[in-house]
């Protein structure tokens, strides 16, 4: 018997996103790094918090039950063939009242 959750369970949203927004900086990075923002949003809403520390992951898991802010961090690798580019960090933040989810760069916070 497999201990891996089935793909249907993994695909279910764990919370409401509210209105989706992104900052101009995040939009430019996603375009330059050839990343579909809906892939990151899908990970976020399914509880894949990305590259957060264990404490932040636990805080997010608790936030699902108490209605607090949810914070994900994703490190984007440079596009294939773009050796001079460095990895880029983007954040996804869903507000505590679940009215808005924003995709932004750390320096835009």
Image (cartoon, grey):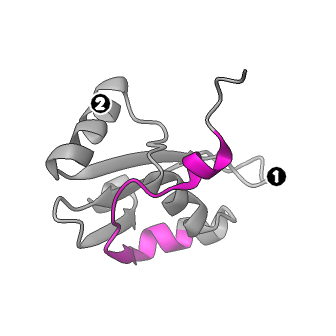
Q: Which of marks 1 and 2 is in front?
A: 2
Q: What element carries label 2?
A: helix
As drawn, 34 above or below 22: above
**View extreme (right): residue:** 81
Decide whether residue 17 is among the magenta residues: yes
Residue drawn at 51 percent across, 73 percent down: 27
x and y, in percent, of residue 32 in the image: 65, 67
* Residue occupying image coordinates x 30% and y 33%: 56
The residue at 49%/41% (across/down) is 50
Left or right of 5 in this view: 93: left
Please give the range of residues in magenta: 6-28
Between 8 and 22, the one lying in front of the other is: 8
Q: Which of marks 1 and 2 is nearer the N terminus?
A: 2
User: What residue lies at 28% left-to-right and 26% top-to-bottom?
Assistant: 55
**Quarter occupied by the C terminus:** bottom left
Q: Give the vertical position of 53 relative to 48 (above or below).
A: above
- Residue 44, label in figure: none
Q: Where is residue 20 in the image (x, y as percent from the top left)?
A: 38, 76
Left of 19 or right of it: where is 46?
A: right
Q: Could you tell me residue 47's position as x and y percent?
A: 44, 46
Residue beneath label 1, please?
80
Q: Judging from the image, what secondary structure is the residue with disc 1 in?
A: loop
Residue 96 part of the magenta-drawn span: no
Q: How many marks?
A: 2
Q: Looking at the picture, tell me which residue is in the foreground, 81 or 5.
A: 5
* 29 lies above or below 107: below
Which residue matches tag 2? 58
State the CA–CA distance, disc 1 to disc 2: 33 Å
Other-residue count near label 2 (Cα within 10 Å), few / some / many at <14 / 14–19 / ≥20: few
Whether residue 8 can be seen here: yes
Q: Which quadrant is the N terminus positioned in?
A: top right
Q: Quadrant of residue 63?
A: top left
């Amino acid at each position: 018997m497999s201990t891996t959750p089935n793909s249907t369970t993994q695909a279910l949203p764990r919370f409401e996103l509210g209105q989706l927004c992104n900052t101009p900086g995040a939009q430019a990075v996603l375009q330059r790094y050839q990343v579909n923002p809906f892939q990151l949003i899908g990970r976020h809403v399914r509880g894949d918090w990305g590259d957060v520390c264990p404490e932040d992951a636990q805080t997010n898991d608790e936030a699902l039950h108490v209605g607090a802010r949810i914070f994900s961090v994703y490190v984007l690798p440079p596009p294939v063939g773009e050796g001079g580019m460095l990895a880029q960090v983007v954040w996804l933040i869903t507000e505590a009242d679940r009215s808005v989810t924003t995709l932004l760069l750390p320096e835009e916070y």
